Amino acid sequence: MILFQAENIVKNYSNHRALDKVTIKVPQKSIYGLLGPNGAGKTTLIRIINQITAPDAGTLTYMKKPMQREDIYSIGYLPEERGLYKKMKVGEQALYLAQLKGLSRHDAITQLKQWFEKFEIGSWWNKKVEELSKGMQQKVQFIVTVIHKPKLLIFDEPFTGFDPINTRQLKEEILSLRKKGATIIFSTHDMGSVEELCDHITLINESRTLLEGPIDEIREKYSENEFELRFEGEINLLTATLNSRFRILEHKKENNYSIVRIQLTNNGTPNDALYSLLDAGKILSFNKITPNMNDIFIKVVSEYREKRKSENPGKKIKK
Amino acid sequence: MNKTGLIIRREYLTRVRKKSFIILTLLTPLFMAAMIVIPVLVMSSKGQEVKRIAVIEKQGHFFKGKIHSTKYLKFSYLDNANLDSLKRHFDELGYYGILVISPKIGTFPSAVQLISHKQPPLEVVTYISDALEKEIERQKLLAYNIKDLDKILKSVETKINLQTITINASGQEKETNTGIAMALAYISGLLIYMLTFMFGAMVMRGVIEEKTNRIVEVLISSVRPFQLMMGKIIGIALVGLTQFLLWIILTLILVLATTGVVMHKKSSNSSMQLPKDLFSAGTEQIIQQQNPTATKTISMEDLSQAQKMLDALKAVNWGLIVGSFIIFFLGGYLLYASLFAAVGAAVDSETDTQQFMLPITIPLILALFIAMGTFQNPESQLALWGSLIPFTSPVVMMARLPFGVPAWQLVVSIILLFLTFIGTAWIAARIYRTGILMYGKKPTWKEMWKWLKYKNF
């Protein structure tokens, strides 16, 4: 089931178009990655989902109905530019933000106590925010983002500024929230965390969608049918057994075994390749090489830029 | 509680709990009360100590018995005293000083000396020279041998106390007091100017704080920018009203308490002492006392003087003044605070505000100048238009009000003020909602104009 859908979203600012017919479909209980270089339009899209700003064209659908103002109370949003009132006490501030999200005072206090206990920060309740370290403040921010048990969670660059321990804790929390039924959209540059967490992604560049879909399918699509073979034996024997079904891209010798990268051609299957390889020596491993998201990202974006440059020679690409 | 209510509550509570707010709220009444009470104390304590002055004439007895003693100033005419020994011993003899009059005084104004250890107070000096002048004038007139001179002088002696009375359309007469009207106009006009600036700037700083703290995006994912802006403006308006009311109440309590103590102390002397000291200028008292027959009538005259002042104060329509003050303070504050909020949203730090502050501060300062002119001529065209045009009306109308303003002008002015506020709030909200999410470079006027046309929720 699709929880949230944005269709053909267009948003113009005074001197540029921030989003140009962008469509995303976020399945329920998925972790949806919003990728793209700086200035691509991710934050604008996120602000549109949060109803901070309105699109010039396009439709927003949330739980199969056109999105309404009240829907923001079932959304939790952790913006990239995030902060707290420095002079306010932690507990008081968390309570205020929770109430703004529609919780009653009583519910807010109960929920907050639980979260503060879980994160072992109960003793901070009466401290002023300015007394906390940045990492501590981020924990408080995370709590107030999820305090009202939102169905949809939106994290804009959630890991920037987190130390590895907090990043890990945040990732675990995101996964456990999904397990409890939440749907999560997050934007990031960190491709490692995309591979680790995301089911679906959209890659936006220069206001347009370049890639969209389940991450496995995308990786499959961009894989070049390449395999890595490790074996003990003679490389010459291997070349001798070469047939038209595959070819060797590169090979190198390491200690007492060889590493070879081969590519299947002419509808060759891995089985065909393995069959021919059996005589070449002792096979240690045979792995499919799937491109990582980082490579796909760079490849897609730079191909797009090349295309734009050749379409508009001499014209500087506007952001 | 609804969202705007929550925001108002936070804005109000965080400010009211601040140390700076508490200190300012408590210290200002102390200062204001001191401004009222200290002159009273000074005036009532002055002359407590009786000053005895020895009068010596170098030749003749022209001034014997001519300088009349008062309650706190006793003159002793010494016929045959040795000036040199007196100079050494007047202190021991219980004199405050020696007045030495030379016979040439008729032609040389400086042929008279007051010798004392301490610099004598101005009142003493003025009193003595006035008495001498009068006596010399009398003696010079005597030289013309005018018949029944004393009688004539008595009959021409005149005292003026101009009564000002306003008459309204229905023919009702009311005694007024220009001095009190001036003071009220000045104080309320200036106060509105200061409070609008103070609390308007507070709104602006609040917006900048939220922007630089980066909390604003968290907030506007829960509430509309307009709610956030209005919540802040209203919350701070309540802070302003709280502070204003506390100032008035605390000042009244302090003034009443301290003057109560003074009055209690002096109750044996004269029960009318306090109002007299409060409202009559010090010199008046002395001039009246020059009149030889005045000793008995002084208190009567003073009483009537004080009574008139009290009546004039009572005649002021306090309900109208205080009510209008609150309405015009709120209207003016709301109008300017929304503009201050827009400026706060457009910039990243307080140092960037100057360029955008100018169009806001100019009308406010202009209003103050018009108000100053109003004191001279409350009926001028400038004052009339200044009190109707919303950007200057809060200050100018408060400056005009104590002199009397037709009801229709007051109503039109208030309506225009609040209509304009709706307009400025609309514009400010549009700049605000875009500005709070813009970081980095300072926007130009052109960009801000474009923000007005962006489509937002």
Image: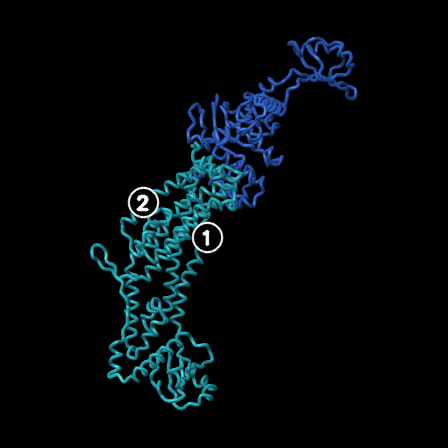
Chain colours: A blue, B cyan
Classify residue A138 by image quadrant: top right
Q: In the rendered view, tell whether residue B21 sits above or below residue B120.
A: above
How many marks overall? 2
Q: Residues within 10 Å of mark 1 (few under 14, many from 20)?
A: some
Chain under label 1?
Answer: B
Vertical position of residue B33 compared to residue B63: above or below:
above
The residue most toward the bottom is B80
Res B8 visible:
no
Q: Are marks 2 and 1 in contact (CB under 8 Å)?
A: no
Q: Residue at x 21, y 58 (%)?
A: B172
Report which residue position mark 2 lands on: B415
Residue ID at (36%, 63%): B256
Instruction: Name the residue nearer the viewer: B170 or A141.
Output: B170
SS of the residue under disc 1: helix
Q: Which residue is mark 1?
A: B21
Which type of secondary structure does the marked residue at label 2 adopt? Answer: helix
Circle 1: residue type: Phe
Image-based side of B391 in relation to B153, left or right: right
Viewer-closest of B329 and B397: B397
